[in-house]
Image (tube, rainbow, N blue to C red):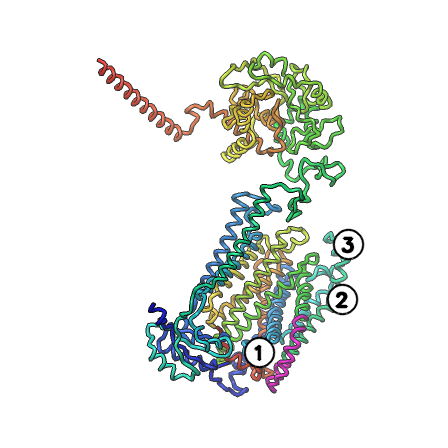
Amino acid sequence: MTDHALKTKPVDHPSFQLPASLAALALPLALGGVVLLIVGILVGLSVGPSARFTMLAYLTAFIYCLTISLGCLFFVMIQHLCRAGWSVVVRRVAELMMIAIPALGIMYLPVLATLWGDDGTVYKWDIPTFDTDTGVSSDSWGEKKQYLNAPWFMVRSIVYLAIWSGLALYYFKLSQRQDETGEITLSERMQARSGPAVILFSLCTTFAAFDWVMSLSPMWFSTMFGVYIFAGSVLAAHCTIAALTYLLQSKGALRDEVTVEHYHDLGKYMNGFTLFWAYISFSQFMLIWYANIPEETEWIYARMTGVWGNLGLALIFLHWMFPFLGMMSRHVRRNPTLVFCWAIYLLMMHFIDIYWIIMPEAESSMGGAIGIVTSLLLTAGMIGLYFGGVLWFARSNNLKMLAVRDPRLPESLAFENI
Amino acid sequence: MTDKSEPRLHGTYAEFDSVEKLLAACRRVRDAGYLKTDAYTPFPVHGIDKALGIKSTVLPWIALVCGLTGTTIGVSMQIWMNAIDYPYIISGKPMISMPAFIPVSFELTVLLAAFGAFFGMLALNKLPRFSNPVFTDPRFDRATDDRFFLMVEATDAKYDMAGVKRLFGDFESLHINDIYDDTSSATIPKPFFVILGVLALLATVPPLVVARMRVTNSDSPRFHVFYEMDFSPAKDSQVTSTLFADGRSMRPDVPGTVALGQFDEAIDFYTGIDMDKLSQLDSPRATRLVRALLDGPVANDGDEPAVDNTVDEPQVDEADSQVDTAVPQVDAADPQVDATEPLVDAKDATPEVAAAEAPAAEMKDEPEEASAAPEAAQLPDTTPSLPATPAGVAPVTSPAVVVDTTPWLTQNPLTITSAVLERGQERFDIYCAVCHGNDGRGNGLVNRRAQKLLSSSWVQPSSMHQDTLYSDLYADGKLFNTITNGVRKMSGYSSQITTRDRWAIVAYVRALQASQNATLEDLPADKRNEIKKLQAEVMKRLAEQAEAERKKAEAAAAKKS
């Protein structure tokens, strides 16, 4: 199938290792991230708008990093499910990010801890007098309370994290083992399990989105919400994979393995999922807008008015139209630097999207300058900790940046777009 | 005949049994500078575009342009349909509501982009074609199986059979051969036409059947392709229904409620009367008016009139409010009646009307009309205002004795802007001009028709330009009340025209009246100059005409003599 002279490198070739410059960044990034997180929390709690605002900003940062990892997990499973050949050279990067899910679970604990207080710092449904405070009928609140109560919520959160971690660890472990042994049966097993795995993943992600993000407005619901979060996360994952791959290549790793063809495909996915995100987001919006039923519109209304409304309108152009048209040309997609730039841009837009989803619950404004500073500190902190952690994990376990003995690697190396 | 014997050369091909050999050959052919080449493979081969030097296709641009055309069509079509041609409010959404327009626009985008891609691809491939010369060679059948072919076409600038064969000789090919144009018969086999003819014949049957059905009667019942369209479950108006016990299909307004936006203005706005003054002058009447306004047509036990003459609500049939027929001006009016116009209202002051009006004992403040039955909440005119027919009886108006003591609003509560006047004009032209004419002289289409029919019970609509209707004798509020509740044969229009629009019509009527009495000083300065200019022109032309006439007369006289 290939006419390329396969550059036969030994499996322990240095270009498959984490470049030293990036490895050196690991600890500073992680520690810096922790520091920024602590500073952000302190700033938020002391001079910030409120404790609720701070915790919601923390939740935003957490969900942002979580969506990247979840998207990477989905990416890995789907590549196995489709027996994809093109993606083998970039799959390890995705695996490195998906394995952060267990650690991310720990980062969710502060949010879970707020449930201890019963004062609804993050989740208003935790307040015992929610129905009387808000005038919700006690019948419907009784129904909701059967789902939205602290113990059951915590159990569910642990279940989601357990399932995701289980899936991530399974695929990671088997991939690592394949690095050693090159067994084809491992690929077959991963492929066979990927079907049920994707189903399990979808259910977990949907309900985690419902629990962790949608329940911020306890009386509001949208069946599209899980898909909405998913769409953003798959987009973010592809962008992160492209960006990290570019960074690795810029530092000397994977220079011969990842070609312009792979960037082309990643670019196609970024473009496609930009449109997919816009489609899902609009579907959710339009149905609520058109029916105009008050019990459904509260969420959209808060995000359509005032400063959030301007941000939402900007998202249409900045998160959809501009990147979609910009990445449409194959010449853009076949330029790794341009793909990298668009990836960074879309990751910023993804943050604004998550911000727009979560933060209106805290304030009708953005919390003023202090509020924005707090949000940015926490986000930067979380991102620093996240990537620092990923790099540190790769460095300390001496992980290869390429699935060196994957049976489909030759196909991936020789991959050519039509 | 030379074509038949010497078929045209199409090109030369080489046959390979593996992708690598084909690709290597492609590259060599490309590097040798041949442009009109093509490769035939059973499956898409990665990298063959580059190997053959095929230029990127223009198809993506076709798809993009078609897609954008679809978007434009979708958006503009919906804007035209919903906001311009037939402005239609759906569920309170704006007329141009982009979220609602997006699904259709999106689908049109995708549809036209898909059409562009599909038909564009066919067009760029010059398809459909009946045949390709390569099929003359039976070896080519394996192009869809397990063989790979590379062809250099004879139309290439550098083509030279020997040269190409030499180049091909370097490749590891299985076979090299020339392809000539297909010389087999291109005539379409006869059975094809026979079948086509039969189908065409059969195709005429359905239209003929339909045509026959259209001109014949049938005993069988109609069949309904879309039953629910023919028998829609929606309730028709003016038809009893089984939905509610009283046979209505809608509930009337709940008495004692006020709809959103219903009474945003002061109450004078809705009655046309200065209610403060009225409550001092005639407090029971003021109370009744307010009650009628608020209670609407439903609060009717029979004792109190179900009249809401001063409210913006649809007049319910049971309301005996449409009693404009019997304005009992009979006595005073008779001698002033135009003999040519039978005053029917005199006849209509019948007992039944009187009986109907008895319970509706509302405003009765015309002592001169004491003999007549009181009207239901309706204020009769001060003087018998007869239509001032242009050709006819000089309207004999009685001396301006104003007996109507109702404190009508003398000033239009609206701020008169050109927008208000335009609105008033538009509404006047819709609702009033049919009878009163666009110029307000009372000779609208209905009047003309009635004259043509020599309708015996017709009363010519009033002209707006009688001085009895000018604002000194007929206040704005009274005009408003006439529009709202009607007068004599005219019914009230409160159910068709909103309160605000009625005031706009009042303003417009005043403008109409002014237009017939305007002097040059009423015009703004620039218009004045225009008129003066026109005047000067007309005078000049008249002078010229007179001059010409004079000359002609002189010439004629000179000729005679």
Earlier sequence position, callout 1 versus callout 3: 1
Mark 2 and mark 3 residues within 8 Å of each other at the beta carbon: no
- What quarter of the picture does the C terminus of chain B occupy? top left
Q: Nearer the viewer, mark 2 or mark 1?
A: 1
Please report, as a chain letter, where disc 1 is located: A
Q: Chain of mark 3?
A: A
Co-location on one chain, circles 2 and 3? yes
Asked if the magenta segment contains residue A79, the reply would be: no
User: Is residue A97 shown to the viewer in this render?
Assistant: no
Residue pointed to by mark 3: A138
Say which residue appears at 61% left-offset and 45% top-offset.
Answer: B92
Mark 2 lies on residue: A151
Q: Residues within 10 Å of mark 2 (few under 14, many from 20)?
A: few
Look at the image and tell me whether residue A222 can be seen. yes
Within 10 Å of disc 3 (Cα), the crowding (few <14, some 14-19, many 20+) is few
Residue at the spot 40% in from the left edge and 30% down from the top edge: B527
The percent coordinates of residue B412 (x first, y second) are 56, 29
Query: Dot 1: few (<14), some (14–19), or many (≥20) neighbours within 10 Å?
Result: many
Q: Is residue A129 above or below residue B342?
A: below
Local secondary structure at mark 2: helix
Instruction: Out of B340 and A285, give the one closest to the viewer.
Output: B340
* Residue bounds of the magenta highlight: A173-199
Q: Quadrant of residue B272?
A: top right
Q: Main secondary structure of the magenta part?
A: helix
Of the numbered discs 2 and 3, the one sitting upstream in the chain is 3
A331 left or right, relative to B268 = left
Residue B370 placement (x, y as % from top left): 68, 15
Q: Which residue is mark 1?
A: A92
| Same subunit: marks 1 and 3 | yes
Amino acid of disc 1? Arg
Q: Residue furthest top?
A: B335
Q: CA distance from mark 2 to mark 3?
A: 20 Å
